[in-house]
Each structure stands twice: as structure tokens, then as C-alpha cells.
Image (tube, rainbow, N blue to C red):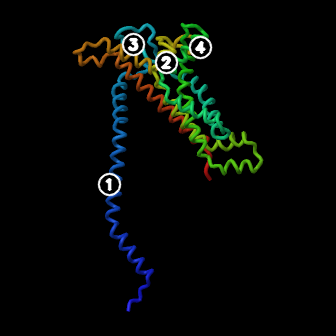
Amino acid sequence: MSTATPVADATERTRELVTSSEPRRKAVDRLMTGVIWVCFLLAMAPLVSLLWTVVSSGAGRMSIDFLSLSMRGIFGGNPDGGIYHAIVGTLIITGWAILISVPIGLMTAIYLVEYGRGPLARAVTFFVDVMTGIPSIVAGLFVVALFTLIFGPAARFGFMGAVALSVLMIPVVVRSCEEMLKLVPNELREASYALGVPKWLTIVRIVLRTSVAGLTTGVLLAVARVIGETAPLLVAVGVSDSINFNAFDGRMMTLPVFAYRQYYAGYATCQPDDIDCIVDIGFQNAWGAALTLIVIVMLLNIAGRLVNRWFAPKLR
């Protein structure tokens, strides 16, 4: 007579089913792991190819003179000159764009998360979404039209480029910062309110402090979005071969515009059947400027990582 209970029988049958399905689950797991690795390699291949092309093509042009001289008085295929004036223009224009965009974008994100209710908040969200898809050339034309009304049709200076870039940066900053602020647990806000802390101080000392790492990442994403823009800067700032530190007086050169001009300057000197013309100095300058731009973006990301480490809340 069997002494097995119904519970024991059910447990045994469950164990048998699990054991019999184990090879199938392992096979599915290996298949999905392989698919994920293939997708990862497919995504990395263009990035690795791009970095290798830029580094291999631009490293040969890098030198102290190339980084410390301008193109003032350099014509034709003269190998002298450098990109110092373009580096200065890129940093100054991008810096002004950050000063304009980050306060506006962060305040808008705080309003949408902490205060925004009703039609106004929905309208702001709608227009932020619309601005996200604005072509960069439209931002440049808008800034030119605006400043032409104020300073006349000949107005071209660095701050105009900063305003054009800020038009492109603001929606990215708003969206990224909004998502980071939403990740802050409501329990932290409620605990602060329970202690009698005002809402504005809770936002400054609790919400922003907790989300500083994500906010920094969002700002860096916006900077990376605009630092390589060419069309709005070509339209709003123009070009220059001289060093200009004043964003409110005179045209300025930036690295994307410099690479664009140098590439087509080299291309214009090529003959249709000259396959060796790629070594022209204009192409070398363009690749060197592209490599410098990538290095600047990398340094900004490293700075962002350090900010995250220094200011992020310490877990004990």
C-alpha cells in the first residue's frame, strides 16, 4: 500500500516537469545571449569604425603648432597654421550656450515636475516636444532674423551662435532633467515637508541634490548634441581666420565650421581622377579638427563624471 500523500505526488510531478524542461530553457537562454551579443557588436561596429577613421586620419596632423596657431595669413596648400582660433571659438560659443540653456532648461523641468498642472504645463510640454525636432538650420535662420532686426543685416558675432545653439539645447535639457527629477522618490519630498522645510528649499537641498548625477548627464548630452553643429554657426556666426575672444564683437571660427571649410577646400583642389589627393593639407586639417572636437567632448564627459563623484549623495 502506497504511503505517498497527494502533496508529495504533486511535488514529484512538478520536479519532473522542471527537470524535463531544463534543456529547453538553457537552449533559449544561450540563444538570447547570442542574439544580445550580436546586436551589441553590430551597434559597436560603426562607432569603432568612426573612431578609428578619425584617429588614423587626424593623428598625423596633430602638433603643438597645429593646436596653438591660427589660419591668419595662410593660403592655398600651405601646411602652416592651425586650429587655435577654432578651439577658442568653439569653447566660447558653447560656454555661452550652456549659460543660456541650463538655467532655462532646468527651471522649466522643475516647473513641469514640481509645480506644473493644467493647460499651461501641457502647453509647455507640447512646445518642448516641437522644439526637439527643429532642424538646426532653422535655429540659425531664426537667430539671424532676430538679431538683424536689432543690429542690422551685417550682424555676425559669436553670441548669435550661442543663442542658436541654446535653441537646440533647451528642449534636450528640459526633457533629460525632467526625467531625472521624476526619479527622485516622493518619500524624500514628503519627509522634508514633514520637518517643516519649505517647498523651494526641498527642491534645492533634496531634489536637486539627489538627482545631480542625472542632471549633469543630461546637460552633457545636450552639449554633445550641439557642439558639433555646423549649419547654424555658419549662418549666424560666419567664418574667420583670426583669433577672437570677444563673443559680442566680430565673427568667430568653430571646429565644425573649420572642418567643413577645410574639407571642401581640399576637395576643390583635387582632380576627378586623382586618387591620391586625399593627402591634401585641407583634408588633413579637417580630420585634425574632427579629432580635436572628439577629444573635447571626451574631456567634457570626464569632467561630468568627476562632478557626479564629487556632488552625488554619499551612500552609507
Closer to the eye: label 4 or 2: 2
Q: Residue at x 24, y 14 (%)?
A: 272
Q: Earlier in the sequence, mark 4 or mark 2?
A: 2
For the residues labelled 3 and 2, the Cα–Cα distance comes to 25 Å
Asked if 11 appears above or below 123 in the picture, the reply is: below
Residue 131 in the image, given as x and y percentages of width and height: 53, 28
Labelled pair 4, 1 in contact (Cβ < 8 Å): no
For the residues labelled 1 and 2, the Cα–Cα distance comes to 48 Å
Closer to the eye: label 1 or 3: 1
* SS at circle 1: helix
Question: Mark 3 sits on what residue?
Answer: 80
Frontmost residue, 55 versus 222 = 222
Density class for disc 4 (Cα within 10 Å; few <14, some 14-19, many ≥20) is few
Confirm whether residue 246 shows in the render. Answer: no
Identify the mark at residue 248; answer none if there is no mark. Answer: 4
| Residue type highlighted by circle 1 | Leu
Q: Residue at x 62, y 53 (%)?
A: 316
Closer to the eye: label 3 or 2: 2
Question: Mark 1 sits on what residue?
Answer: 31
For the residues labelled 1 and 3, the Cα–Cα distance comes to 56 Å
* Left-right relation of 16 to 227: left
| Residue type highlighted by circle 4 | Phe
* SS at circle 4: loop
Identify the mark at residue 233; answer none if there is no mark. Answer: 2
Image quadrant of residue 111? top right
For the residues labelled 4 and 2, the Cα–Cα distance comes to 14 Å
Q: Earlier in the sequence, mark 4 or mark 1?
A: 1
For the residues labelled 3 and 4, the Cα–Cα distance comes to 29 Å
Q: Residue at x 44, y 12 (%)?
A: 71
Residue 212 in the image, given as x and y percentages of width and height: 60, 40
